[in-house]
Image (cartoon, rainbow, N blue to C red):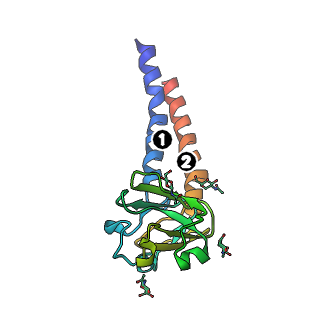
Amino acid sequence: MEKKLRIMALGWPTMAVVLTCAVVAMLPGVSSTRFIVGANMGWTSNMNYTVWARGKHFYLGDWLFFVYDRNQMNVLEVNKTDYESCNADHPLHNWTTGAGRDVVPLNVTKTYYIISGKGFCYGGMKVAVTVEKLPPPPKAAPVKSGSPGLLSTFKGQIVVPALFAIAAVWDSFLLLA
Ligand SMILES: *[C@@H]1O[C@H](CO)[C@@H](O)[C@H](O)[C@H]1NC(C)=O
Ligand SMILES: *[C@@H]1O[C@H](CO)[C@@H](O)[C@H](O)[C@H]1NC(C)=O
Ligand SMILES: *[C@@H]1O[C@H](CO)[C@@H](O)[C@H](O)[C@H]1NC(C)=O
Ligand SMILES: *[C@@H]1O[C@H](CO)[C@@H](O)[C@H](O)[C@H]1NC(C)=O
């Protein structure tokens, strides 16, 4: 009985660290950003996505999330020439899955040129997003968070191991008690 209690007690500091890490991982400055293209308007006609993308920073590890009418639009990545001319005949990547909910992982530092085929590009359904490598300097009110950045490196390589080390010491005290 007593032994069982000890074994349970042994795990708590480590459990606390695991939970703390889970919370830390969700804080701004660590997580990647999922951009809903067009925000609450989604991926649709009558939107100017050049205006939507203006002033936003897209970093490696972020995602674009396209929400739209699956019966009408699609999500095609094309090259610069085809972006400008709205040519959907030879996409570099067809991100359309059929659900009207498509995720584009921004895992390359380049400009992603994305259009809707089926004629919608001509009405302005096109977005160009340039993915940057470095996270922004710390801001008072971060609009987005960079990943991986200095802050996440600090948390991942210094804070987290330190917490585990403290927990290990704590564990052994409980064990000896
Ligand atoms: C885009 O692809 C088209 C067709 O394959 C090609 O003619 C054009 O030169 C390409 N443009 C760029 C910028 O690569
Ligand atoms: C893109 O992929 C979807 C789902 O596989 C398919 O239905 C659609 O025809 C494709 N579109 C183009 C332009 O390749
Ligand atoms: C980026 O993600 C796409 C889609 O998951 C994948 O096909 C591609 O290989 C990835 N590229 C890199 C450089 O990781
Ligand atoms: C979107 O807005 C920009 C800047 O106001 C303008 O240059 C561009 O022509 C617009 N695009 C469309 C498709 O209306």
Which residue is depicted at the point 61% across and 77% down?
81
Label 2 crowd bin: few (<14), some (14–19), many (20+), radius 10 Å: some
Residue 31 in view, yes or no: no
Q: Of residues 78 and 18, which is closer to you in this image?
A: 78
- Judge left or right: residue 112 versus residue 52: right
Q: Amino acid at mark 1?
A: Val
Depicted 41 relative to depicted 155: above or below: below
Q: CA distance from mark 1 to mark 2?
A: 8 Å
Depicted 170 relative to depicted 146: above or below: above
Q: Position of residue 93 (x, y in %)?
A: 58, 60
Secondary structure category for the residue under label 1: helix
Q: Position of residue 152 (x, y in %)?
A: 55, 58
Which residue is depicted at the point 31% across and 66% down?
40
Q: Amino acid at mark 2?
A: Val
Label 1: which residue? 17
Report the disc number at residue 160: 2
Q: Are marks 1 and 2 in contact (CB under 8 Å)?
A: yes
Return the residue found at the far left: 40
Q: Position of residue 84 (x, y in %)?
A: 55, 79
Q: Of residues 9 and 54, which is closer to you in this image?
A: 54
Quarter of the image with the N terminus is top left
> Which of the 4 image quarters holds residue 85?
bottom right
> Which of the 4 image quarters holds residue 5?
top left
